[in-house]
Each structure stands twice: as C-alpha cells, then as structure tokens.
C-alpha cells in the first residue's frame, strides 16, 4: 500500500524532503498515481546543484561525449516514465510507492550502521524511549537516499541503458572529489 507523502517526509532531512517534493511534482505533472524511484531520479537530475548529476559526470563512460551520455540518460528516463500508468488526477499529492518507501527504509538502516552516527542514534533512541514516540526520528540524508534509490532494479536498468553503471555512480557519491581552495 502506498505511503502518504507527509509520512515519508518525516523520515527525511530538509534537503532530502525537498528532493521528494520535487519527485512528487514530477509524478503529479505526468498524471501518475504514485511517486516512484524513477520520479525521484528525474527530480534529482533536474535540481540546480544535483549530487546525482555530479556523480554521473564523474562516472561517465569515456567512450561517449558527456553531453551525448546525459542526453541518452534523459531519453531512457523519459521512456521509462512514459511507461508508468497514469491515473485520474486528484488534488492530493501522489503517494510514495512501496519501492521508493523501501529505499527510504534501506537508507535509514544504512545510516544507522555508519560508525560516525552511532552515538547520535543512541541518543535519539533514548529520547524516543523517554517520549514513547512511535515515529522514527532517523532522518535520511540526501546522499544515503540517492544510494538506496540507485539499488532499485528499475533505476539501475535505466542507467544501464544510458551507458552508466549504478555501482560507479554510487562510488562517485561515496567518494566525492576533494575541494581545491
């Protein structure tokens, strides 16, 4: 069963929630009944300072020109989005699909496992026990959300059709270029 957008937003940091909002807008514009990982990729690639676009630029196949490979990605993504069934338009936001919500949950689990976050999550867990809150306070960061979305087989197939490898994009996200002053 799809998850309401407001519920999914509670699991995300401000930056990741903004990306989800953009994905919902893409789904709404296309008349789709649910917001999927494909909508999220489309939104992430269209953001002005997109970590996904930057990672794709670093993970490109050198046999093709960068412009040509990005054009191929846009076309493959567009074709895949065209295959998503449309539904009757309503005023509500298209809910988050099970696969996208699963990516959010995987992101939470991965973030929880990162050693640098251990003390932070231990404190959050203690606060939750004291307040007996039922909503998980582990806010997914945009980087972790992108990594989990890239694990989605449909997304991986789209990138593969455009000549990208999800594993190389993930590596480019995890190991960004050092900043030169």
Image: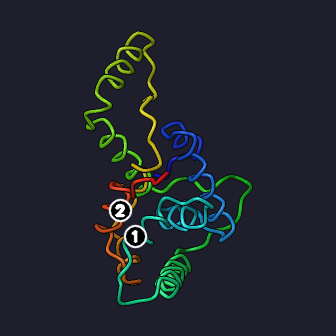
Of mark 2 and mark 1, the one earlier in the sequence is 1
Which residue bears the numbered disc 2?
A: 172
Tag 2's secondary structure?
helix
Q: Is residue 109 left or right of residue 79?
A: left
- Residue 37 lies left or right of residue 9; in this view the side is left
**Based on the displayed image, in which of its 4 quarters is residue 132 positioned?**
top left
Image height of 154 relative to 109, above or below: below
Q: Residue at x 31, y 21 (%)?
A: 122
In this view, the residue in front, 28 or 77, is 77
Is residue 47 positioned above or below 18 on the image? below
- Which residue corresponds to the image point at 35% horizontal and 82% vertical from the top-left? 61
Residue 162 x %, y %: 41, 83
Horizontal side of 179 relative to 29 (left or right) equals: left
Q: Farthest residue toward the right?
A: 91
Q: Residues within 10 Å of mark 1 (few under 14, many from 20)?
A: some
Work out whether residue 10 or residue 71 is closer to the camera in this orientation and state it. 71
Q: What residue is rendered at 35% in x and 90% in y?
A: 63
Left or right, 103 with respect to 46, comes to: left
From the top left corner, tell me how far across and down residue 74 is, in percent. 54, 80
Q: In which image quadrant can residue 117 be found?
A: top left
Residue farthest to the front, as pictured: 181
What is the image's colouring? Answer: rainbow
Q: Nearer the viewer, residue 4 or 81?
A: 81
Percent position (x, y) of residue 8? 51, 43
Q: Secondary structure at mark 1?
A: helix
Q: Looking at the image, do the residues carrying marks 2 and 1 touch, with CB atoms under 8 Å apart?
A: yes
Q: CA distance from mark 2 to mark 1?
A: 6 Å
> What's the mark number on residue 125?
none
Q: Residue at x 52, y 39 (%)?
A: 13
Residue 135 sits above or below residue 46 on the image: above
**Mark identifier at residue 58:** 1
Q: How many marks?
A: 2
């Amino acid at each position: 069963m799809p998850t309401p957008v407001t519920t999914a937003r509670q699991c995300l940091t401000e930056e990741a929630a903004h990306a989800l909002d953009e994905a919902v807008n893409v789904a709404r514009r296309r008349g789709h009944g649910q917001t999927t990982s494909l909508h999220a990729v489309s939104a992430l690639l269209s953001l002005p300072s997109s970590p996904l676009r930057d990672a794709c630029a670093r993970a490109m196949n050198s046999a093709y020109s960068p412009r040509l490979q990005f054009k191929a990605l846009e076309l493959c993504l567009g074709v895949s989005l065209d295959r998503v069934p449309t539904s009757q338009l309503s005023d509500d936001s298209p809910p988050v699909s099970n696969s996208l919500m699963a990516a959010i949950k995987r992101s939470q689990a991965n973030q929880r496992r990162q050693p640098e976050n251990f003390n932070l999550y231990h404190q959050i867990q203690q606060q939750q026990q004291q307040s007996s809150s039922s909503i998980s306070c582990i806010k997914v960061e945009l980087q972790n959300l992108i990594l989990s979305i890239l694990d989605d087989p449909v997304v991986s197939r789209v990138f593969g059709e455009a000549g990208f490898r999800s594993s190389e994009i993930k590596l480019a996200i995890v190991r960004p270029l050092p900043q030169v002053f």
